[in-house]
Image (cartoon, helix red, strand yellow):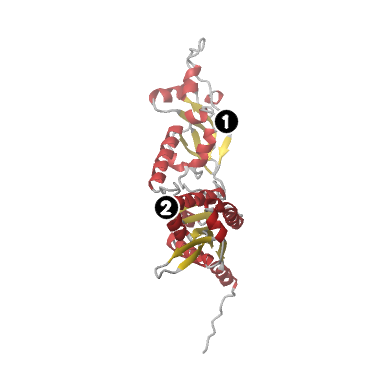
Amino acid sequence: MKTIVKQPYGNTRNITVETLLRYVEPVQPETEAEKIFACFSENKSLLAIPVVKDGRPVGLISRYEFVDSFAQPFRREPPGNKPCKDMMNTEPLLVEKSTPIHELSGFLSESELRHITDGFIITEQGRYIGIGTGQDLLREITKAQIETARHANPLTFLPGYVPINEHIEHLLQSGKSFAVGYADLDNFKPFNDVCGYCKGDELIQFTARLLSNICDPVHDFIGHIGGDDFILVLQSPDWEQRCNRALTSFAHTSSALFDKDHRSIGGYLTGDRQGRIVHHPLPTLSIGAIWVNPELFGSHHEVAEAATTAKKIAQEKPGNSLFIERRRLQEHIMAEEQPATVGAYYG
């Protein structure tokens, strides 16, 4: 049997296969085929019947294959007392209820057609709890895509505030630790003012692609909260290296977006309100990162506040820079390692 279980890390969409669950009364392997025939005859919308033994699925009986087997020439005799185990698919698709639906969708897109038409068995720790259908999966994915598009940033099509906050809140509630990186373009405003908003939009889209490329599509999440600000929610074990990779990539490739004259002087010359000529450096990328332990953060609001502080510190460093705030986690570890205080009693 092919089994899909939840990956060790979550994803941007926190919708699981459990939302597709429909309970269908299972049958035993020894159940007579005549009873299966009766079930399909009584319920015209029933597409498949799970076969379960000792609480664990062992097969799936497809309506179309079952009925078709008796529609063949020389096979018009009634099903009779034949056990259904002789007519079931012994390799149904088993899916744990906690599996994100995008993982199931990806698997089905490269799988056999029967897994879509017949459906799949949904389990909880390997035990049968219901079935799901390809139609229900498609409906849920379409609904999720519409919801994502509604909250996406129109310039980059990346998730905006609402999906970002929902994703962080989901991870906090799940008790999972993760890193959050707040990425921001330094000196973006003068670049936008001098070169025009079209060039500014191009730089933002360039940064969005660059940051997306360093994210693992299974483990990590990227959102665009507006302007030149991006949020990375990273569960990849090498998240720090990924942040540094983004900075290196920006340093090596962003120059293609700047005019030759600007590159030659390392920035732009503009006049301030007092009429003085001011030099503004070329845009660089800063990332302020924090490690989020769910025991230390009560909500996405607290995570956002800590990430914002880390980003401001990163921006104080010249050039493309990464600052990782570790103090809160270190203080938590030190507090746990402190011996218990013994109170003194004075009589």
Amino acid type assigned to the residue bearing label 1 in the image: Glu
The image position of residue 252, as x and y in percent, is: 60, 53
Q: Residue furthest top?
A: 74
Q: How many other residues sit within 10 Å of disc 1, few (<14), some (14-19) or many (≥20)?
A: few
- Residue drawn at x 54%, y 82% is 343
- Residue drawn at x 56%, y 64% is 323
The image position of residue 31, as x and y in percent, is: 50, 27
Amino acid type assigned to the residue bearing label 2 in the image: Tyr
Query: Is 40 rendered above or below residue 56?
Result: above
Q: Nearer the viewer, residue 316 or 52?
A: 316
Image disc number at residue 91 = 1
**Cα distance between the residues tagged 1 and 2:** 57 Å
Q: How many marks?
A: 2
Q: Nearer the viewer, mark 1 or mark 2?
A: 2
Q: Nearer the viewer, residue 222 or 227?
A: 227
- Residue drawn at x 40%, y 22% is 41
The quarter of the displayed image where residue 125 is located: top right
Q: Secondary structure at mark 2?
A: helix
Query: Is 110 rendered above or below residue 245?
Result: above
Q: How many other residues sit within 10 Å of disc 2, few (<14), some (14-19) or many (≥20)?
A: few
Task: Give the mark nearer the N terminus: 1 vs 2.
Answer: 1
Quarter of the image with the N terminus in it: top right
**Contact check, label 1 and label 2, Cβ < 8 Å:** no
Image disc number at residue 193 = none
Q: What residue is shown with label 2?
A: 197
The image position of residue 86, as x and y in percent, is: 56, 23
Query: Is 20 rendered above or below residue 202?
Result: above
Q: In the image, is 179 to the left or to the right of 156?
A: right
Q: In the image, is 2 to the left or to the right of 131?
A: right
**Viewer can see residue 260:** yes
Q: Secondary structure at mark 1?
A: loop
The image position of residue 274, as x and y in percent, is: 40, 70
